[in-house]
Amino acid sequence: MNNKGFSRKDRVNEQIRREIAELIRGEVKDPRVGMVSITEVQITPDYAHARVYFSTLEGGEKVAETMEGLKKASGFLRRELGRRVRIHTTPELHFIHDVSLERGADLSKLIDEANRLSDSTPEE
C-alpha cells in the first residue's frame, strides 16, 4: 500500500461504485430498480467477486423487488463494467441491501423525539 492514502483496491472499489450507479441511473430499464443509491463496493482480493451495497427510499417489501431487479440486471451491469473499467477480471456482482442509512434516519428520529420530550418536561 502506498502512502498517498488510497490503495489500488480502494480506487477500483470507488470506480466500480461510480460506474454501477451511473449504469443503473441511465441504462437499467427494469421498473423494479427505481431510486437506488450504490453506497459501497467491496471487491475480493482476486477481483472475482464484488459486494455491491445499495440503499433505496422504497420501504420493506419493495426492497425484495429491487433486489430481484438488480440481480436480473447484474449480467448487463457486469458486461458494461468490463467495457468501462480496466481490470484483469470483471467481478461477479452480489447485491446487498445497506440498511445503515435507514438505521441512521431512525436513530435521528428517536433523538429528535427525546429532545422534544425533554424540552416539554417542566424543570424542577
Image (spheres, rainbow, N blue to C red):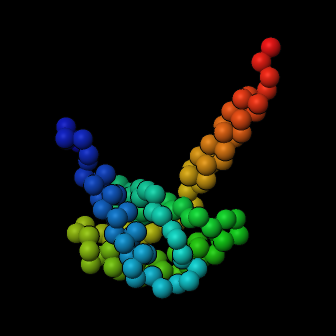
Which residue of the protein is positioned furthest toward the top in this rendering?
124
Give the quarter of the image for residue 14. Answer: bottom left
Residue 46: percent from left, percent from top: 34, 59
The relative height of residue 101 versus residue 30 in the rendered view (above or below) is above
The reply, left or right, for residue 12 in relation to residue 108 is left
The relative height of residue 106 versus residue 118 in the rendered view (above or below) is below
Q: Is residue 88 visible?
A: no
Residue at the location (61% across, 53% down)?
102
Quadrant the C terminus occupies: top right
The relative height of residue 72 versus residue 41 in the rendered view (above or below) is below
The residue nearer to you, when weighing 53 against 120, is 120
Residue at the location (63% across, 75% down)?
65
Quadrant the N terminus occupies: top left
Residue at the location (40% across, 69% down)?
21
The reply, left or right, for residue 67 in relation to residue 41 is right
Residue 78: percent from left, percent from top: 38, 76
Residue 112: percent from left, percent from top: 66, 39
Give the quarter of the image for residue 62. Answer: bottom right
